[in-house]
């Protein structure tokens, strides 16, 4: 019966292909194995005789998308059809969750179908399985033979339950996926009733889920079109193969294992009655059960090996981020590359990477499968990230149902999410970022070992980001050194230019006095005014560079009145107040503040012994967030001017607008 493992978050389902010998059961599994995407299949194991006939079973492990946070693992088995292996067929049916009966359509094999169907019913009853309710799909295979039994006749005899019946030519892939989709739907419908695993109330019909699952697993829902297009091999079956001959089947991929066992020639002739026959039957059952368990253990071991290899590759990708960043690859592209394997490890299709920009603020640095960051779309999610997630130290999954605010934020997007896994990326000194993995209601949630692996990836990524940050710091230090050299040269040039301007001003003043009255004197006056302004700006620049601005008492109205009309709109009335400082340097700081805010409106007020001048948009807008004013050269210049005058620059928010405010001591 179905196995639910809450710790591993898996649902194991057993689907058995039953039917007469040489009916096409093995061929169905081989076609499924050949067609399914590699990441969704395990190794096809067949235990055959020396003549390549199945003597124990064929086993194909398949992985599919699950329901309500559980992975779906399918064990697809085909029983041996020959009369000799009746005990094995009975054993394989033990614990079956659903059945596919593969009937041979050949007209001369009809009685074998009836006998096999009757035997299947008896074996189900022996295991206390109800033949009238167990999910069942019929496949009428080999419809390409010259003489076939009509489907209507087969239905009347075999399909008393009116279950889905599929015509098929398995060696050509015709009807194989259709049969598998039908039994998958029937199985999940049954589980929905018995175990309430499938939540059909969410509005997604089960048939829609089946179609999406088939496309995910096989890339298509039918192999007929691919055969017609020539993308799948076409093999003919000219007639019904007699007993002892192997039915022709599609070539299998490399990940298939066939064990061939040579049986003694007289084993078929053993038909002793009484205790000897029962002893032989019990021996066959014990061998079959041992083989089943060993095959299952082998499949689990191979899964563990593949997981270990994949996790090693994930760590290598996270460690390689440093090399990518050092090589000049953009941070966003590098983070997206790491988010890929991290999302796979966390069983998520949607992910983002957030970087901190303050004690409680973050920004989305990379997205995977998302157009926008779900939690940063609104204030509720943004606040939740700042208050809860930034303090996380280990990977952890948060369920939407456990927190009202989180549930509201996760449900607001499309698709709505049921959980988010937070993977903090920390160094010994600081938080470098958060990887957020978003899970829908149907996604399997990460297991403890998955969370541990993502923690290892985060540790490797933190080393990469710290190294990249150190390299950036080294490059920034070199840029600062170059800037300092240029600044020293510029300061020297400014001093020389200031001396030239002073000499030019004095010379023009002397010429103006010598010119007496008249037009020539007026011309000298017009030249002197811009020269005086240039001289004042040069002196202010020198004072700003040296940190020694001149100080004088200046009226606030006079300071604001000289701001350029095209760059500032000064609100009136202006309070009666004065400040002490260099007027030219203060105007330069206000212009830098306007550039940093992107606005034009200037308002002033006196408050608590300080004169506060704030700038913002000319018209009321939404309240800006803190990251709307990122660090820039204009902000740095405004802050420098404020510091030189004993003041500060801050942000102020009202109902509609966030302002940048320059606070100066009043006189």
Image (cartoon, rainbow, N blue to C red):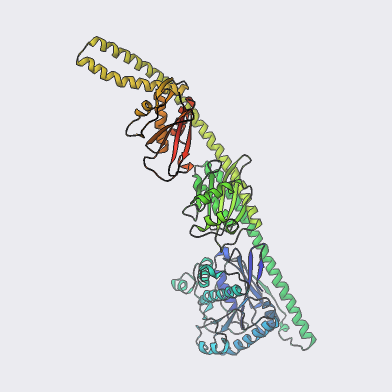
- Residue found farthest to the left: 518
Left or right position of 561 against 243: left
Note whether residue 102 is visible: yes
Residue 266, quarter of picture? bottom right
Whether 17 is drawn above or below 373: the answer is below
Q: Nearer the viewer, residue 445 or 481?
A: 445
Note whether residue 150 is visible: no
Q: Nearer the viewer, residue 181 or 385?
A: 385
- Report the residue at 72% width, 80% height from top: 264
Left or right position of 182 against 506: right
Q: Nearer the viewer, residue 175 or 63?
A: 63
Rendered location of residue 50, percent (x, y): 66, 76
Position of the C terminus by quadrant: top left
Residue 426, quarter of picture? top right
Position of the N terminus by quadrant: bottom right
Rendered location of residue 273, percent (x, y): 77, 89
- Report the residue at 49% width, 56% height from top: 369
Rendered location of residue 533, percent (x, y): 34, 22
Rendered location of residue 237, percent (x, y): 52, 80
Whether 82 is drawn above or below 645: the answer is below
Q: Nearer the viewer, residue 42 or 207?
A: 207
Whether 361 is drawn above or below 313: the answer is above
Residue 188, quarter of picture? bottom right
- Residue found farthest to the right: 275
Left or right position of 265 against 650: right
So how many labels did they put on this image?
0
């Amino acid at each position: 019966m179905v196995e639910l493992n809450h710790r591993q978050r898996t649902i194991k389902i057993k689907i058995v292909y039953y039917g007469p010998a040489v009916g096409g059961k093995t061929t169905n599994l081989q076609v499924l194995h050949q067609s399914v995407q590699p990441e969704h299949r395990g190794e096809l194991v067949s235990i055959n005789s020396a003549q390549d006939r199945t003597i124990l079973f064929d086993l194909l492990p398949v992985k599919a998308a699950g329901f309500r946070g559980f992975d779906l693992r399918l064990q697809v088995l085909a029983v041996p059809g020959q009369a000799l292996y009746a005990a094995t067929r009975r054993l394989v049916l033990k614990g079956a969750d659903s059945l596919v009966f593969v009937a041979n359509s050949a007209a001369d094999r009809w009685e074998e179908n009836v006998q096999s169907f009757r035997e299947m019913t008896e074996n189900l009853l022996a295991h206390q399985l109800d033949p009238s309710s167990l999910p069942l799909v019929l496949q009428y295979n080999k419809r390409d033979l010259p003489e076939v039994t009509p489907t209507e006749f087969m239905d009347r005899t075999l399909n008393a339950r009116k279950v889905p019946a599929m015509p098929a030519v398995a060696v050509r892939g015709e009807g194989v996926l259709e049969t598998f989709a039908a039994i998958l739907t029937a199985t999940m419908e049954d589980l929905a009733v018995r175990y309430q695993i499938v939540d059909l109330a969410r509005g997604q019909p089960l048939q829609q889920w089946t179609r999406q699952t088939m496309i995910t697993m096989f890339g298509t829902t039918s192999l007929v079109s691919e055969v017609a297009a020539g993308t799948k091999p076409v093999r003919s079956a000219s007639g019904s193969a007699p007993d002892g001959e192997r039915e022709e089947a599609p070539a299998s991929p490399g990940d298939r294992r066939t064990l061939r066992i040579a049986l003694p020639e007289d084993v078929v002739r053993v038909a002793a009655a009484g205790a000897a026959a029962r002893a032989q039957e019990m021996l066959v059952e014990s061998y079959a059960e041992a083989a089943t368990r060993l095959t299952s253990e082998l499949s689990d071991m191979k899964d563990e090996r593949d997981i270990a290899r994949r996790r090693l590759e994930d760590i290598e990708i996270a460690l390689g981020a440093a090399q990518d960043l050092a090589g000049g690859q953009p941070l966003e592209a590098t983070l997206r590359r790491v988010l890929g394997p991290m999302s796979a490890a966390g069983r998520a299709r949607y992910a983002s990477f957030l970087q901190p920009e303050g004690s409680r603020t973050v920004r989305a640095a990379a997205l995977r499968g998302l157009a926008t960051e779900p939690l940063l779309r609104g204030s509720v999610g943004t606040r939740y990230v700042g208050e809860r997630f930034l303090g996380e130290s280990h990977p952890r999954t948060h369920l939407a149902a456990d927190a009202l605010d989180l549930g509201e934020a996760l449900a607001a997007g499309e698709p709505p999410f049921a959980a988010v896994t937070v993977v903090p990326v920390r160094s010994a000194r600081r938080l470098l970022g958060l990887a957020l993995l978003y899970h829908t209601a149907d996604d399997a949630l990460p297991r403890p070992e998955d969370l541990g692996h993502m923690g290892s990836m985060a540790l490797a990524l933190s080393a990469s980001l710290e190294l990249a940050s150190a390299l950036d710091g080294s490059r920034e230090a070199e840029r600062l050194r170059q800037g300092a050299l240029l600044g020293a040269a510029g300061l020297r040039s400014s001093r020389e230019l200031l001396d030239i301007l002073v000499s030019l001003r004095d010379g023009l003043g002397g010429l103006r006095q010598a010119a007496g009255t008249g037009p020539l004197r007026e011309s000298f006056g017009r030249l002197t005014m811009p020269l005086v302004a240039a001289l004042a700006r040069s002196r202010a620049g020198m004072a700003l560079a040296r940190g020694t601005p001149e100080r004088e008492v200046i009226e606030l109205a006079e300071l604001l009145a000289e701001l350029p009309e095209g760059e500032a709109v000064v609100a009136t009335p202006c309070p009666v107040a004065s400040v002490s400082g260099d007027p030219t340097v203060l105007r330069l700081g206000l212009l830098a503040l306007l550039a940093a805010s992107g606005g034009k409106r200037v308002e002033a007020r006196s408050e608590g012994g300080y004169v506060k001048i704030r700038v913002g948009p000319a018209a009321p807008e939404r309240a800006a967030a803190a990251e709307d004013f990122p660090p820039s050269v204009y902000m740095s210049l405004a802050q420098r001017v404020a510091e030189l005058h004993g003041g500060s620059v801050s942000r102020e928010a009202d109902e509609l607008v966030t302002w940048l405010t320059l606070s100066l001591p009043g006189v």
